[in-house]
Amino acid sequence: MRARLLPLLVILMAGTLLALGFPLAVSLAAGQQQRVVVDRIDDSARFAALAQFVIDAGSGSTNADERRMTLQLELARYQELYGVRVGVFFRDDSNLARSPGGWQIPKSKEGRQAFQEALAGRRSHDPPQVWPWQTDGRLLVISPVVLDGDVVAVVATDSPTDLMRGRILQGWLLIAGGLAAAMLVAFGAALRLTSWVLKPVQTLDAAAHGIATGRMNSRVATAGGPPELQRLARSFNEMADNVEEVLEQQRAFVADASHQLRNPLAALLLRIELLALELPEGNEEIASVRTEGKRLTQVLDDLLDLALAEHASAEISLTDIGALAAERVAAWRPYAEEKGVRLTETGRTALTGWADPIALSSALDAVIDNALKFTPAGEEVEVSVAAEGRSVRVVVADRGPGLTEDELLRVGDRFWRSGRHQNVKGSGLGLSISRALLAAGGGSLSYEKNPPHGLRVTVAVPRTDPHGA
């Protein structure tokens, strides 16, 4: 969720900053150019006043020539000092004075338009914007020279824009730096905001995962985060309390029922044995009753074990899984030889993982016992140990009849047994007990076919401590 929420906030904030930054940059460029234009208009007004003084003196007189020479010298000093081309031009494009000597008003569209506007009595106040990347850009400003209410000439200035473009670029760099700093601050704020919003969600997810893996005491701290998520955390804790209470009642009922039924069942079996003394030796009914009584006793014992397994917490530690598997294979090998089944071990002999050794031993015993039960004489049961990803896997593969696809979906359910195996000794709770014992320590139990026939049961435990100890 953080990976989706954080980019969304960053994009929105970046869009907002850019929406503010672009107009600011354009406004800065326009302001810098307007400043130059205003300066040139002021200078043009001074030159226009001098031109009026020259034109008013008439032409051909000594006084007029002196005034014209004075105007020419002013224009030359101005051009030398500021590098601005400047000239006074009559309506027919002839010049009164100019610097440098051969300069003319540019014949471009903008130049002709500015010249016509000046002849109409309007000053250039809004020339086209010059941008920093226009290295050959110049700024043309033309103002009218008015004498007795008539426009008799114009003053034109053609300014270089290097300094102006440099100031614009410098201002843009400052804006870019400000936007970058604001973006960093906004990113930090977005990071804190997403952490504040999502921390309760992450805690809730961790607690839900803990409950899903059997740690029923997992709860969520209700402090911090938005009020809605705090209310959700409290509701989750209430739900978890209720679920834990219901499960505890269920476990207590199963354990109590199993325990309380054992005494009456033991008394019943004792009376059956006393009754058998009065009957002939080898009576089939008595033998059948004894068998069912023993089966019922086994079911009650398994129910009690299941209730204890679901209630008990795992005491996991770093365990040599390879050595433990080899130990269980050695313990079951005499029984396998008695049945005529080859029990072999392959894979790594030294491989560590995190597990409850007692729970893992019980699970391996149940799985190997099932494999030997259903594997006919002359076939093989293979136990292999290997590391795969973040877990250590012990695979028990037999060559029995196997299970169908539908049966694979149900294997491991409580009291479930395949209809083809009802005559095989067992209560249908062994794998359920093993799964409960493994789940308490972060392990798992899975099933798949073992071609061409048979079943593969995989016991997996984590390679790292699932509880983060």
Image (cartoon, rainbow, N blue to C red):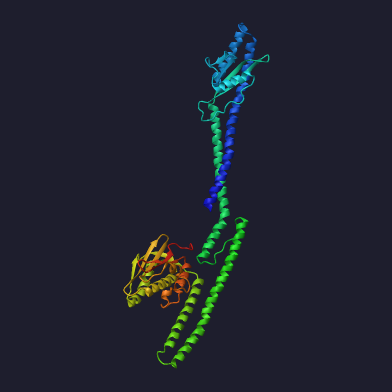
- Give the residue drawn at x 44%, y 90%: 276
Q: Establish if 206 lies above or below 96.
A: below
Q: Nearer the viewer, residue 318 or 56?
A: 56
**Residue 340: horizontal and vertical position, in percent?**
32, 76
Q: Nearer the viewer, residue 164 or 118?
A: 118
Q: Establish if 174 lies above or below 8.
A: above
- Give the residue drawn at x 39%, y 74%: 369
In the picture provided, is 384 more to the left or to the right than 105?
left
In the rendered image, the residue lying farthest to the left is: 378
Res. 398 image quadrant: bottom left
**Residue 393: horizontal and vertical position, in percent?**
40, 65
Q: Evaluate whether residue 222 shows in this view.
A: no
In the picture provided, is 457 more to the left or to the right than 106?
left
In the picture provided, is 268 more to the left or to the right than 332?
right
Q: Nearer the viewer, residue 426 or 420?
A: 420
Q: Evaluate whether residue 404 shows in this view.
A: yes
In the rendered image, the residue lying farthest to the right is: 148
Q: Nearer the viewer, residue 466 or 406?
A: 406
- Please tell me how many numbered marks the rendered image carries: 0
In the rendered image, the residue lying farthest to the top is: 61
Res. 286 image quadrant: bottom left
**Residue 229: horizontal and vertical position, in percent?**
60, 57
Q: Establish if 433 lies above or below 14.
A: below
- Give the residue drawn at x 59%, y 68%: 242
**Residue 182: horizontal and vertical position, in percent?**
57, 42
